[in-house]
Amino acid sequence: MNAKVETRLLKPTPEALALAAELLRAGELVAFPTETVYGLGANALDPAAVLKIFAAKNRPADNPLIVHIAEREQLNGLCEVTPTAENLMDAFWPGPLTLLLPKTAAVPDAVTAGLVSVGVRMPSHPVARELLRACALPIAAPSANTSTRPSPTAARHVLEDMDGRIPLILDGGDCEVGVESTVLDLTGEEPEVLRPGAVTPEMIAAVAGVCAVADSVMRPLREGETAPSPGMKHRHYAPKGRMTVYRGRPERVAERIRRDYDRAENACILAYREHIPQYGDRRVWELGRDEAGAAHSIFALLRRADEQGISRILAEGVRDEGVGLALMNRMARAAAFDIVEAED
Ligand code: TXA
Ligand code: MG
């Protein structure tokens, strides 16, 4: 890294948004809230600005970035918009759905890591929208965490990872969804989910007729296998402590977790609200009331575990349905696929 910069953390006032837009136009990086997680943005049309993202995050150069826009017209000249893409944009934009479409030469290779497709998304968060409108540029933005750390869902998470590396973080409060957007590949025969998110395969199929899910979504990559989405081959969402996810009937899950907790040192349990009483006076943190609540809080809980020096994380799993698929995809990776089926 170059000499340290002073990182400002500002509420999204009109002045702060104007400053952010000016920094982006000048080829600098700005972190901003979206409805999913915080993004680390740069002018997508400026290769030198885009390369700063990879340096600040310590991100492998072969992992492509998503391009964020405020208006659909901004896609003109950047990618080929297919009829299916149009229908999906009508249904889910602005919102947590990224579409992979054939790119044009106008998109720098630094953005797409040399791939022939580009990921595009129109976020719904009002601060993201205002910023994108103010700078009037397509903005390349990965999640604003250091590579391998959990994605940031609050401005302070971004500050933890990016202090001294970027000039500005816009603080828009906690991100509502909490897991990153659905990444949908539209370059093949049928739409295929490469990364699950809040826009589920069922929701996509209702609009596009069909929707496949890459089978690597819920398992580790095999030796020598190429990842359909480069992001999936890199180590992800890794807490410092060892994590295990438990699935099955709630009573059996609680039994296994209690047993493993009592054998471990410095452990914490991640449990749904209604199951918390089953853990007595053990250290238990609430995932939420349901899958959506757990998606909202999972990354913040993993960061809390790191802060508190937790060495063992025992987490209740969920069904792979609805946003549960996205949640289990992240939890399975955080646990390096250490998943226990609590048998009857
Ligand atoms: O919700 C989100 O998508 C957030 C916010 C900031 O918008 N962004 C985000 O970006 O999660 P990032 O870079 O952390 O994750 C992007 C994922 C990576 O797994 C990457 O490999 C994949 O999308 N991706 C992007 N462009 C791709 C492409 N052309 N082909 C295949 N995969 C692509
Ligand atoms: Mg990321």
Image (cartoon, rainbow, N blue to C red):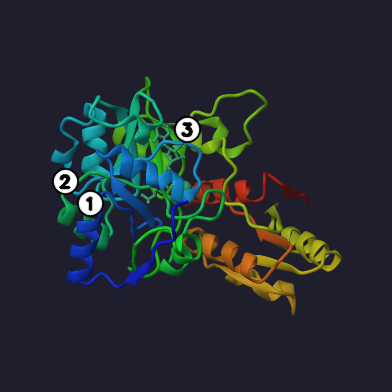
Which residue is labeled 1 in the image? 26
Please tell me whether mark 3 sits on a helix, a strand or a loop: loop
Q: From this viewpoint, which residue is outermost toward the top? A: 189
Quarter of the image for residue 103 reads top left
Task: Point out the tag, 2 or 1, that comes first from the N-terminus.
Answer: 1
Residue appearing at x 45%, y 60% in the figure: 162
Relative vertical location of residue 276 with respect to residue 28 in this rendering, above or below: below
Mark 3: is the Cβ under 8 angstroms from ligand 1?
A: no
Q: Which residue is mark 3?
A: 62
Q: Contact (CB < 8 A) between labels 1 and 3?
A: no
Which is more toward the observer, 66 or 62?
62
Q: Is residue 255 left or right of residue 141?
A: right
Say if residue 322 shows up in the picture.
Answer: no
Tell me if mark 2 has few (under 14), some (14-19) or many (20+) residues whose alpha carbon lies within 10 angstroms of its own: some
Residue 182: x, y in percent? 40, 43
Amino acid bearing label 3: Asp
Instruction: Give the spatial CA distance, label 2 vs label 3.
Output: 28 Å
Amino acid type of disc 1? Ala
19 relative to 326, above or below: below
In front: 268, or 213?
268
Q: Of discs 2 and 1, which sits in the foreground?
A: 1
Q: Secondary structure at mark 2?
A: loop
Query: Is residue 266 or residue 314 the one in the foreground?
Result: 266
Residue underneath mark 2: 71
Instruction: Quadrant for residue 124, please give it.
Output: bottom left
Task: Give the residue type that dot 2 points to.
Answer: Glu
Q: Secondary structure at mark 1?
A: loop
